[in-house]
Amino acid sequence: MADASKDIVDGFPGDKKIIVVFVLGGPGSGKGTQCAKIVQHFNFTHLSAGDLLRAEITSGSRNGVMIQNMMNEGKIIPPEVTIKLLRRAMLDSANDKFLIDGFPRDEENRAAFENITKIEPEFVLYLDCPEDELERRILSRNQGRADDNTETMRKRFRVFKESTLPVIMHYDLKGKVRKVDAAKPVDEVFEDVKVIFAPLIAKV
Ligand code: UDP
Ligand code: MG
């Protein structure tokens, strides 16, 4: 699609009020699963940062090898790469409501996203789940992901605690975190998620 608005460096076309909800939680906390259900019920567009990065690997892009190597170590890919993918996906969509799943994973990504897009999230959905349950889920799910092995999983847990929890803290101080108990079965978690999204939809 040729569209002049895609050439702008910063921000978004000004006439569109864009609503973003960040969905965060440890690896295996059910971000993708809950996002799929939110999409069905509340008409959001789901953007998984991890899936966008994995698509870059399979497309054979210039950054693919770097992304793959970092992912295999559970490391966070530089923000300019991930934000470019997210921003392009948002501009390509006709929707104005986005669930951004698995991002921002650290304070650097958070600050860069806000600076570049000028968007602050409406709120952050935090899927809270104890590590032993996360471990059980990751080791039993079979999605062919190279990073779903015991060694990488432990690194991802550490990165979540050291780098992503501070992002959640940042938004918590602004009263923007909506926490749910994600250790429960999928449908029970979604019951709690629905309560959180219902007022947002009524408002817009
Ligand atoms: N990743 C990243 N930046 C992001 C999202 C993901 O660098 O904004 C990388 C990181 O290496 C992470 C991996 O992609 O460990 C998988 O992320 P995903 O969200 O798919 O994993 P999940 O947390 O859902 O298991
Ligand atoms: Mg995921």
Image (cartoon, rainbow, N blue to C red):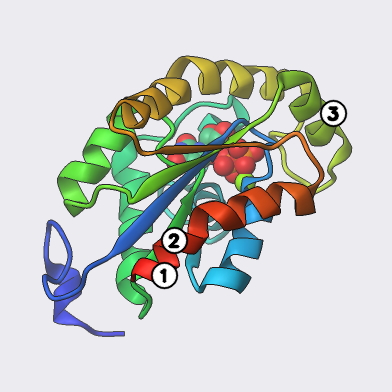
Q: What secondary structure is found at the residue carrying circle 2?
A: helix
Query: Which image quarter holds the N terminus?
Result: bottom left
Quarter of image, ligand 1: top right
Alpha carbon of mark 3 to alpha carbon of mark 1: how far? 37 Å
User: Residue visible at 72% across and 38% down?
Assistant: 146
Q: Earlier in the sequence, mark 3 or mark 1?
A: 3
Residue 2 x %, y %? 24, 85
Q: Which residue is mark 2?
A: 199
> Which amino acid type corresponds to the residue marked 3 in the rendered image?
Arg
> Which amino acid type corresponds to the residue marked 1 in the rendered image?
Ala
Residue 136, label in figure: 3
Q: Earlier in the sequence, mark 2 or mark 3?
A: 3
User: Which quadrant of the structure image shows residue 86?
Assistant: bottom left
Q: In the rendered view, tell whether residue 79 sits above or below residue 89.
A: above
Res. 27 visible in picture = yes
- Labels 2 and 3 touching (C-beta < 8 A): no
- Labels 1 and 2 touching (C-beta < 8 A): yes
Q: Which residue is mark 1?
A: 202
Q: What secondary structure is found at the residue carrying circle 3?
A: helix
Residue 71 x %, y %? 56, 34
User: Which of pointers 3 and 1 indicates the residue nearer the eye?
Assistant: 1
User: Residue visible at 32% across and 38% down?
Assistant: 79
Q: Ligand 2: does it lie within 8 Å of the C-beta at label 2?
A: no
Q: In the rendered view, tell whether residue 62 sits above or below residue 106.
A: below
User: Residue visible at 35% across and 75% down?
Assistant: 92
